[in-house]
Amino acid sequence: MNWIKAGILFFILWLIQTTLLWSVWPLAAAPSLLLCAAVCFVWLYDSWYGLVYALVFGLLIDIQTQNLFGVCAVSFVLAVLPAMGLRLIFNHERALPVIAAGLAATIICAFANWGINHVFGAPASVQLVLQTLPALLVSHAVICLLLHIVFVRTIIKHRKDRRYVGGVM
């Protein structure tokens, strides 16, 4: 996937997250489609596009919602970096490691967001983070699985592919 298609995808996810998802999500905290997409994108494609778009769209979310500028963007970057490292160890075509990376990114992002807000004196409660974390973990696991299923089809060669040379799928 090239950087233009990735940018369009992240823009669409940003629109869905900031307009539709935040207003109709029934649970305490709405999931972050951008964080899940950044983790899946970094996991499947060996590129920096996921990290760069997580930073850019995290800044857009900061402009819209946060009292402090850069909190969401830094949290996204800190959460996506371990997925880049784990990609070197695990097979990137399997679903379970990307779900585990998404769950780790969720925990890192939640506590990084809380920590940065707490350090700079913004109202932040670790109790609220701990209350919303289980719902976020479940929703992010499902979203990462769905995004992985959609994205993995673009990198796996199939038998009907004209460049398929055989081997174990």
Image (cartoon, rainbow, N blue to C red):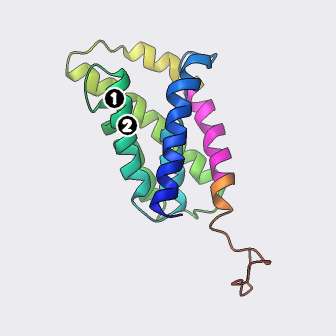
Q: Which residues are magenta?
A: 136-149
Estimate the x, y position of residue 97 in percent, counting from the top left: 58, 53
Q: Amino acid at mark 2?
A: Gly
Estimate the x, y position of residue 127 in percent, counting from the top left: 42, 13
Q: Is residue 103 visible?
A: no
Q: Is residue 116 above or below residue 55?
A: above
Drawn side of residue 53 relative to residue 70, left or right: right
Q: CA distance from mark 2 to mark 1?
A: 6 Å
Mark 1 secondary-structure assignment: helix
Q: Which image quadrant for residue 20?
A: top right
Q: Residue at x 58, y 25 (%)?
A: 21
Image quadrant where one finds the C terminus: bottom right
Q: Are marks 2 and 1 in contact (CB under 8 Å)?
A: yes
Q: Amino acid at mark 1?
A: Asp
Could you tell me what secondary structure mostly forms the magenta stretch? helix
Drawn side of residue 135 relative to residue 131, left or right: right
Identify the residue under disc 2. Answer: 58
Q: Which mark is residue 62?
A: 1
Q: Is residue 25 above or below residue 7?
A: above
Q: Is residue 123 visible?
A: yes
Estimate the x, y position of residue 161 in percent, counting from the top left: 74, 78
Q: Residue at x 40, y 48 (%)?
A: 53
Mark 2 secondary-structure assignment: helix
Q: Is residue 144 magenta?
A: yes
Q: Is residue 21 magenta?
A: no
Drawn side of residue 27 relative to residue 88, left or right: right
Q: Is residue 135 above or below residue 3?
A: above
Extreme residue toward the right, this view: 160
Drawn side of residue 23 relative to residue 50, left or right: right
